Amino acid sequence: MGVAIRADLATVPDYNIPGTAPDAVLLNSNEGPLPPPPAVVEAITRAAVEGHRYPQWFSDTLVGRLAAELAVPGERIAVGCGSVSLCRDLVQAFCGPGDEVLCAWRSFDAYPVFAQVAGVRARTVPLDAGHRHDLEAMLAAVTPATRVVFVCNPNNPTGTAVRGRELRAFLDRLPDRILVVLDEAYREFVDDPDVPDGIELARDRPNVAVLRTFSKAYGLAGVRIGYCVAAPAVVSAVHKVSVPFAVSRLAQAAALAALDRPEEVRSRAAAIVRERGRLQALLTRHGHPVTPSQANFVWLPLGEEAAGFADFCARHGVLVRPFPGDGVRVTVGLPEENDAFLSAADHYRAGTDPARV
Ligand SMILES: *Cc1c(COP(=O)(O)O)cnc(C)c1O
């Protein structure tokens, strides 16, 4: 007789681990295309000298720094090993048996997985015809068991964003016993002024938690660090369930050093936003379907063609992320990387093989 594994884990989907290949153009994980600035690498190296010592349990120095940057009291900030770990901590802290998590679909695939792992039901509400959160339908899907609602803004993988007026109306009508997690992993790439800043929304709403990360615009995906801004009671709950010392000394040092270089982060994000505009315009002009994006990726709603399209791109050296049956998410990279993708996409449409022309 083997060891008894929780039976319900059999139905938890395996993570779709993004592919990688030595010379491929990697547009499948929404990473920043450039390595961290040298000063950030140096800060990581300096922190490694004290690698025999545990890090600060609650990342106090970084919390103090973020508090000053965001004009938010430190007791309203929790730091995590990537914001994805904070998603999990929030589900863990707010939900128990019989409770429900509500999220849009498609949205970030970790939300329903975390619910299921916590033994909690995930109720999903389809995006609207424009691939956007359908906040009306989400309100209608709230039940007495709902504890946590995820709103991914901009949404991964479709890149669409909800606007301030609709989001405020949604928050006003939702029972305030429900925690709303505004996942703003892509906030730095938003250029539509009507998309609200979650941290402002959270200031006077104790049931709103905002997630931000250093993985995307800050280019530190491999370092693993993100944070949550929420009411002090929510932060304390996250602290209770989080894994001790999950945020390494190296990650804390890297985040602090990155915060010292706001210009670098802004100019890198601005370059991605410019490239996003160029890529969207060219895709549209070349006859590809593309959804307007506020993030560092674009969404091609290719439906049943998604998997074949992604395979075709991979065969031609460009890795993109298929969501079979729905669409393909393509990270905006450096200009030459985006050109390589566009060329593969054009060959796919034309039915020609770029390896042979
Ligand atoms: C990338 C991403 C995150 C953050 O990931 P971490 O690397 O864990 O900080 C969180 N939410 C969404 C929707 C993302 O796409």
Image (cartoon, rainbow, N blue to C red):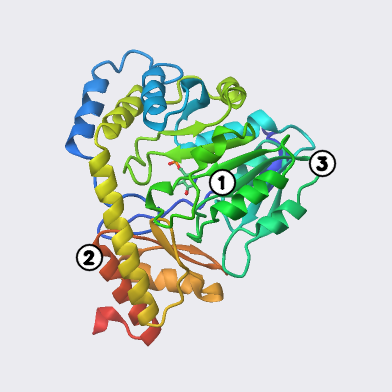
- Mark 1 Cβ and ligand 1 under 8 Å apart: yes
Determine which residue is flagged by label 2.
336
Question: How far is disc 1 from disc 3 in space, using C-alphas?
Answer: 23 Å
Height in image: 268 above or below 7?
Answer: below
Does the numbered disc 3 mark a residue whose Cβ is under 8 Å from ligand 1? Answer: no
Q: Quadrant of the N terminus?
A: top right
Q: Give residue 69's position: percent from left, percent from top.
A: 37, 30
Q: Which residue lies at the image location 26% right of the left edge and 78% below the top edge?
A: 355
Of callouts 3 and 2, the N-terminal one: 3
Answer with left or right where residue 39 lies relative to residue 102.
Answer: left
Mark 3 secondary-structure assignment: loop
**Relative side of 87 to 36, left or right:** right
Disc 1 crowd rating (10 Å Cα; few below 14, some 14-19, many 20+) is some
Which numbered disc, 1 or 3, marks the residue that appears first in the sequence? 1
The x, y position of residue 94, in whole percent, is 68, 31
Q: Nearer the viewer, mark 3 or mark 2?
A: 3
Instruction: Pick whichever, 313 or 62, lies toward us.
Output: 62
Q: Which residue is mark 1?
A: 110
The kind of secondary structure element at disc 1 is helix
Distance from Cα at disc 1 to Cα at disc 2? 31 Å
| Residue kind at label 2, given as amino acid type | Glu
Residue at the spot 74% in from the left edge and 40% down from the top edge: 175
